Image (spheres, helix red, strand yellow):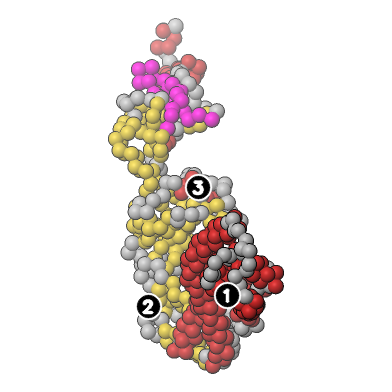
Amino acid sequence: MFKKTKNWSRKKKAAVAVVTIVLFALIVTVIYANFKPEDLPEYQVQTVEKGDIQSTFDTQGVVESGSTETFTAASGVRVMSVDVKVGDHVTAGQQLATFDVSTLNTQLAAYKSAYDKAKSSYDKSAKSVSDAKTNLSSVKSEIAAVEKEVAQLQKEVDAAENAQVSLPETPKLTEAQVQQIMQQLASGGMTQEQISEIIAELRAQTGNVDITEALQNSAAAKKLQLTQKQAQLTALETQRTLYETQQDTTITDLYKSVMDQKSKEYESYKALVDSLKTGWKATADGIVTEVNLTAGEVFTPKTETNNNLDLSSIMSMASGNSDVASVLSDIFSTTAGSNTGTGTGIIVENYGDFYASFTVGKYDFQDLKVGQKATVISLDKTYDAVVTYVSATANSTSGFDISSITSSLTGGSSSSSTNSAPVKVKIINPDEKIVLGFDVDVKIDTEKLENVVRIPVEAVTSSEGENCVFVYDPEEKNVVKRTVELGIGSDTYYEVTSGVSLGEQVVLNPKTALQDGDKIAVKS
């Protein structure tokens, strides 16, 4: 055979060689394809270490001015001029609007009259209470003295009635003396029966008798004196009850509350009229954000505010006392029907401090404190900020809380409660990209832990309601799935309290196909 190949031409030998190489390559390829080892999935791993974790709260807020100046006008005032429009930039002292306040004089006089009536009613009631307290003290002293006299007279009457008297053989009183005594007793207001009783006692006396002394010491006279003192005591006790009733301050307190409110209404309306009389001027540099005035027209508020006293609640307190109800009705009727409402005329947002304002639910509320550092992002620019206000109370809302929705979308916790608390962060060194009324992104640094065991956020997966990681074994080149307990988290790390140890390696971004015990290749 070799002899035959020696006789082949060079061209034929070359062709055979090429065919042989190709066949060999095909055979090798087929064998490799059937017996080559399967490629391992590649993952990055990171060593479990200690470090700091800064937890943050992310939400959206609305830019507000640190100082909003609202100019309030009285309903019915005539607007003379309006010197600004929405969007105008104004400087401190710049004229905004002027008014004719002559149409408000009637309303102002009504407020003053109502206050004067309320003050007069209070003063009278207060004086009555004061006089009652003084008189009550005096009456109590009189009652104590008369009670002693009554007790003493009762003893004397008892003694006189129990005395044993022997009748004389002949009376010592002449008929003229008896008639004289009877006249004296009758002129003193005694009845005929009382007079007869006294005369009988006098005739029973023996020896020479002092008629005046006998009259004074007779049992009938003592009874008369006792009756008179008891009547005096009853009158004094009636007076005491009256004064005790009069010193009750309930009605006086009611009058005072009405007087105080009417005073506030008058002073407030007077200050309003005075401000309109001088015209409105900006007190600081700012931008006009609302104008509700038209030159030459009478002002009618879009939303009218009336701070007058609640008449129904006050009148209900006076129910059952017609005199008090009549006085209050007279006071309230003084301003009834007057056009005394007020409303917003112009609003100027002052330049200076700017804030991002938002609300939070009850869970996030516990993590936010005044003084916490924050950042605000507006139009792709980041600004340093600080929490300056966290409300101590929650407000009730009827709709969705935008901050709670945003929190759930950005990874923060959210609350399903309809109650929310307002929060403000002050934006440090704002510029033209901070625009009033625009939404901004807010991130607040809340809790910070230092030198704790931590793992990357990308290493954590969820399986059947538990947090899990895949720990890489460099010797076996496989992974072990473990359940981990997590503490607080940030955008990049979680605190891990159990499940992994320092120095172990965890797989980053594990795919759903990765299973416990799988071998992997580690990316460099």
Furthest residue in direction front, as rendered: 169
Foreground: 199 or 307? 199
Q: Which residue is mark 2?
A: 285
- Residue 364 location (% of width, % of height): 47, 47
Nearest to the observer: residue 241 or residue 70: 241
Residue 379: x, y in percent? Answer: 42, 61
Q: Which residue is mark 3?
A: 362
The residue pinned by badge 1 equals 308
Image location (x, y in percent) of residue 24: 45, 17
Q: Amino acid at mark 1?
A: Asn
> Where on the picture, by quarter, is residue 350?
bottom left
- Seen from the viewer's position, the closer of residues 42 and 436 is 436
Mark 2: give few (<14), some (14-19) or many (20+) Cα within 10 Å.
some
Q: Earlier in the sequence, mark 1 or mark 3?
A: 1
Separation of marks 2 and 3 at Cα, in angstroms: 38 Å
* Residue 22 shows in the view: no
In x, y percent, where is residue 480? 43, 21
* Quarter assignment of residue 242: bottom right
Tell me how far mark 1 sits from mark 2, CA to CA.
Answer: 34 Å
Magenta residues, dominant SS class: strand
Task: Give the crowd class for mark 3: few <14, some 14-19, many >=20 residues within 10 Å.
Answer: some
Q: Between residues 342 and 431, which one lies in front from this camera angle?
A: 342
Mark 2 or 3 closer to N-term?
2
Which circle, 2 or 3, is nearer the viewer? 3
**Magenta span of residues:** 465-486
Closer to the chain start, of discs 1 and 2, is 2
Q: How many marks?
A: 3
